[in-house]
Image (cartoon, rainbow, N blue to C red):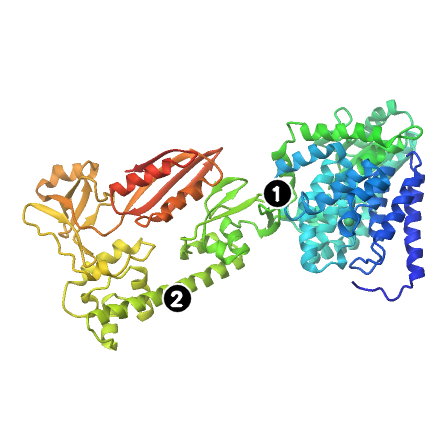
């Protein structure tokens, strides 16, 4: 812990007493029943419990609970129970005292709140949280029994934000991000506008220090001209309001740095073009509640007689207040400089409620108010807001999204950790940022519990889960799905590593092949193979061998043998294969080709060279009834018996058809399987498991869409024959949630 050496222990105690006295004075001047005793007890208990502990800034720790309690009372408007709980809020978490100790000393109510605060510090709001909107809503509803927990937590966060400068930058960034995406929208929802604005501005300051600095400077630089302009604008209105005999304040409020910046971002305009930098506000004194509304409209009439009003921008929150009880009349008029100016018209009471939410209610209570009753009434308002089907969970998420920086999004991991990403970032970016291994094995993602492909572009507020498969390897074309530099760098490194492994494997197999055939490794042998394959160097050669794209045979290393065309062709076939071919013996062993004795054309592969070509139109696989067609290049193209293309060929070129049958095939063939079902946890993983545990199947591609609970998957596999396909479909159909799994033609 840091020591603040400039301050003596006596001075420190004075500081603590002063802070506490300030808290008490604020409380005593409020309309709450005066229960100083319990507050005093809580203060002393907390002070002793945190004795000797310091904050990161070097201050005595107790100053933090005092500050939180002060916010709870003076800015949120809560009374003795909440003040005491705020003073004690970190005791259970940070000291040896337990909730039972608190209960013994302060009773069940305060203990329950402290317990709630301790739990959410590491739980719901902490690192392990799932920050889904729905969870939020549930959280608030379950907590509304003790909404004070949420409110004190809000005060805690506000004080931590106000003192954030003493944290290391990486923590600042994380806390600021979390504040912007969780606490500020929550404050907004709870009607705590002043706190919401402050939280936003502080978050912005730490997330984008340079921009914050620049905008602050621009605001103060333009202050003088703004004041002049406002003086010109307000003079004729003041005259009329004076004539009405009103007691009022008429001033301007500059927007917060954050909202100015937000506007610049969303509208793509420079600071100078944010014309509604400020709103003008008229707050008039009025004791007669029944006259408030009429006075607002009278003021409106006076203003619109001086200036032209914007036809679409009159907001009447008098007749229909906002759900959170906001009441005011807004009008936008054309100022003398030709710019629109918004004028907000409110009574003093309306203004207090708008700015301070709950805190303002106390002020208008006659006599001493009972915290419980007041909370009750206010709670029912909040509960209404939360239960209201209109601003539902989705809407809440939208609120979070609205606050997004234009160029950045923040997403959540299933553990509730936040991650700031550039706009356009994908599931694959997240996977690679979390860990290279997650990236290289990523097969898909779950966004807000729905399956999405790894190329899926994320939106702010999304919850992202990465699905992996151990057998999956990184692909070069993934780069086009990545927008983060970190993701790209890690993918390239992984590909390089993978390539290295394949080259080593290819080289080993090449050397083994030479040894088996008693061929000495010479430069001549190597350059022959390289030239023959029309490739650049031996790395490429070994890579293609390791990858299974170049077959090992005698032609590769000697001049005798077949024309290169066959090899060329063979490479095309295997180009799409992602897994290396199985062990070399199938290639080196002499598998005697079936001899074409009759008019039957046996489909076979020998030494890795096939004597046929699979038709692109119908993709037959061994087991299918097939017919061969001799094409112009004298190659036998194999079609399914019932292929429509074949039917057409049959009509014109009947003589070129060959009776064919499958024989001795070691190749794998492409088959597409369509899977449909109900989207369930782990369904994709189960499918992948079946494929990866079955050695005769390679997965080539998987396209997954999940729409409103319906799971749809197009699976492309490399497979030996129809039997294997049927088996695979049968196995997949056994997975819970899968309705159909059929091979597509
Ligand atoms: Mn705290």
Answer left or right for 523 relative to 50: left
Q: Which residue is pictured at 28% across the width and 38% down the height?
A: 745
**Crowding near pointer 2: few (<14 within 10 Å), some, many (20+)?**
some
The x and y percentages for residue 628 are 14, 44
Q: Which mark is residue 76?
A: none
| Residue at the outermost left position | 598
Front residue of 693/206: it is 693
Q: Which residue is mark 1?
A: 130
Q: Which residue is pictured at 25% across the width and 65% down the height?
A: 533
Q: Is residue 29 above or below residue 258?
A: above
The quarter of the displayed image where residue 702 is located: top left
Q: Which residue is pictured at 53% across the width and 59% down the height?
A: 486
Q: Is ligand 1 less than 8 Å from the beta carbon at label 2? A: no
Helix or strand or loop: what does disc 2 sit on? Answer: helix
Helix or strand or loop: what does disc 1 sit on? Answer: loop
Q: Are marks 2 and 1 in contact (CB under 8 Å)?
A: no
Q: Is residue 568 visible?
A: no
Answer left or right for 174 relative to 357: left
**Crowding near pointer 1: few (<14 within 10 Å), some, many (20+)?**
many
Q: Which residue is pictured at 40% across the width and 46% down the height?
A: 689
Front residue of 314/153: it is 153
Q: Is residue 106 above or below residue 541?
A: above
Answer left or right for 202 relative to 744: right
Q: Is residue 49 visible?
A: yes
The x and y percentages for residue 202 are 74, 51
Answer left or right for 731 relative to 158: left
- Alpha carbons under labels 2 and 1: distance apart: 40 Å
The x and y percentages for residue 447 are 53, 42
Task: Point out the tag, 2 or 1, that comes first from the N-terminus.
Answer: 1
The quarter of the displayed image where residue 290 is located: top right
The x and y percentages for residue 93 are 75, 49
Q: Which residue is mark 2?
A: 500
């Amino acid at each position: 812990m840091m020591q603040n050496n400039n301050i003596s222990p006596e001075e420190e105690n004075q500081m603590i007493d002063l802070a506490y006295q300030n808290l008490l004075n604020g409380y005593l001047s409020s309309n709450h029943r005066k229960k100083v005793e319990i507050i005093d007890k809580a203060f002393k208990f907390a002070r002793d419990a945190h004795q000797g502990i310091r904050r990161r800034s070097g201050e005595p720790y107790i100053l933090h609970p005092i500050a939180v309690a002060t916010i709870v009372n003076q800015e949120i408007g809560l009374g003795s129970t909440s003040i005491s709980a705020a003073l004690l809020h970190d005791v259970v978490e940070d000291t040896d005292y337990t909730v039972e100790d608190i209960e013994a000393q302060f009773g069940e109510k305060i203990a329950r709140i402290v317990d709630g605060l301790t739990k959410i510090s590491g739980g719901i709001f902490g690192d392990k949280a799932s920050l889904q909107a729905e969870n939020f809503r549930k959280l608030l509803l379950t907590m509304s029994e003790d909404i004070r927990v949420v409110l004190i937590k809000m005060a805690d966060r506000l004080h931590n934000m106000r003192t954030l400068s003493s944290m290391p930058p990486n923590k600042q960034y994380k806390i600021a991000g979390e504040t912007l995406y969780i606490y500020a929208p929550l404050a907004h929802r709870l009607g705590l506008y002043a706190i919401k604005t402050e939280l936003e501005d502080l978050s912005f300051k730490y997330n984008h220090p340079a921009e914050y600095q620049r905008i602050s400077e621009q605001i103060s630089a333009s202050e003088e001209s703004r004041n002049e302009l406002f003086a010109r604008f307000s003079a004729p209105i003041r005259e009329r309001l004076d004539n009405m005999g009103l007691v009022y304040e008429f001033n301007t409020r500059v927007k917060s740095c954050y909202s100015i910046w937000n506007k610049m971002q969303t509208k793509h305009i420079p600071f100078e073009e944010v014309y509604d930098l400020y709103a003008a506000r008229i707050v008039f004194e009025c004791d007669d509640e029944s006259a408030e509304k009429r006075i607002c409209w009278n003021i409106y009439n006076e203003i619109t007689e001086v200036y032209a009003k914007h036809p679409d921008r009159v907001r009447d929150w008098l007749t229909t207040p906002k759900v959170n009880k906001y009441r005011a009349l807004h009008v936008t008029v054309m100022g003398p400089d030709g710019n629109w100016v918004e004028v907000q018209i409110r009574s003093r009471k309306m203004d207090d409620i708008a700015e301070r939410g709950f805190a303002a209610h106390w002020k208008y209570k006659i006599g001493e108010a009972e915290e419980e009753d007041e909370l009750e009434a206010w709670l029912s308002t909040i509960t209404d807001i939360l239960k209201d089907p209109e601003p539902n969970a989705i809407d809440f998420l939208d609120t979070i999204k609205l606050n997004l920086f234009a160029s950045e999004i923040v997403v959540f991991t299933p553990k509730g950790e936040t991650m700031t990403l550039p706009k356009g970032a994908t599931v694959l970016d997240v996977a690679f940022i979390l860990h290279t291994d997650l990236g290289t094995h990523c097969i898909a993602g779950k966004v807000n519990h729905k399956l999405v492909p790894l190329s899926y572009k994320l939106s702010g507020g999304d919850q992202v889960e990465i699905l992996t498969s151990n057998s999956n390897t990184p692909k070069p074309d993934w780069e086009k799905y990545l927008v983060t530099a970190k993701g790209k760098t890690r993918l390239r490194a992984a590909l390089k590593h993978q390539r290295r492994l394949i080259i080593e494997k290819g080289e080993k197999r090449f050397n083994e092949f030479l040894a088996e055939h008693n061929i000495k490794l010479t430069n001549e042998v190597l350059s022959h193979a390289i030239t023959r394959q029309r490739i650049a160097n031996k790395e490429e050669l070994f890579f293609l061998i390791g990858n299974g794209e170049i077959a090992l045979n005698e032609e590769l290393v000697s001049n005798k043998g077949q024309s290169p065309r066959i090899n060329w062709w063979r490479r095309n076939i295997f180009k799409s294969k992602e897994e290396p071919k199985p062990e070399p013996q199938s290639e080196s062993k002499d598998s005697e080709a079936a001899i074409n004795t009759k008019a039957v054309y046996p489909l076979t592969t020998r030494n890795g060279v096939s004597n046929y070509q699979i038709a692109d139109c119908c993709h037959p696989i061994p087991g299918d009834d097939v017919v061969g067609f001799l094409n112009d290049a004298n190659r036998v193209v194999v079609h399914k018996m019932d292929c429509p293309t074949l039917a057409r060929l049959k009509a014109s070129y009947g003589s070129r058809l060959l009776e064919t049958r499958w024989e001795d095939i070691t190749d794998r063939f492409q088959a597409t399987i369509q899977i449909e079902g109900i989207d369930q946890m782990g369904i994709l993983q189960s499918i992948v498991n079946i494929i990866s545990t079955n050695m005769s199947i390679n997965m080539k591609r998987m396209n997954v869409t999940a729409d409103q609970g319906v799971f749809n998957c197009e699976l492309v596999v490399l497979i030996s024959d129809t039997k294997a396909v049927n088996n695979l479909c049968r196995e997949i159909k056994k997975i819970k949630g899968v309705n159909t799994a059929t091979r597509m033609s």
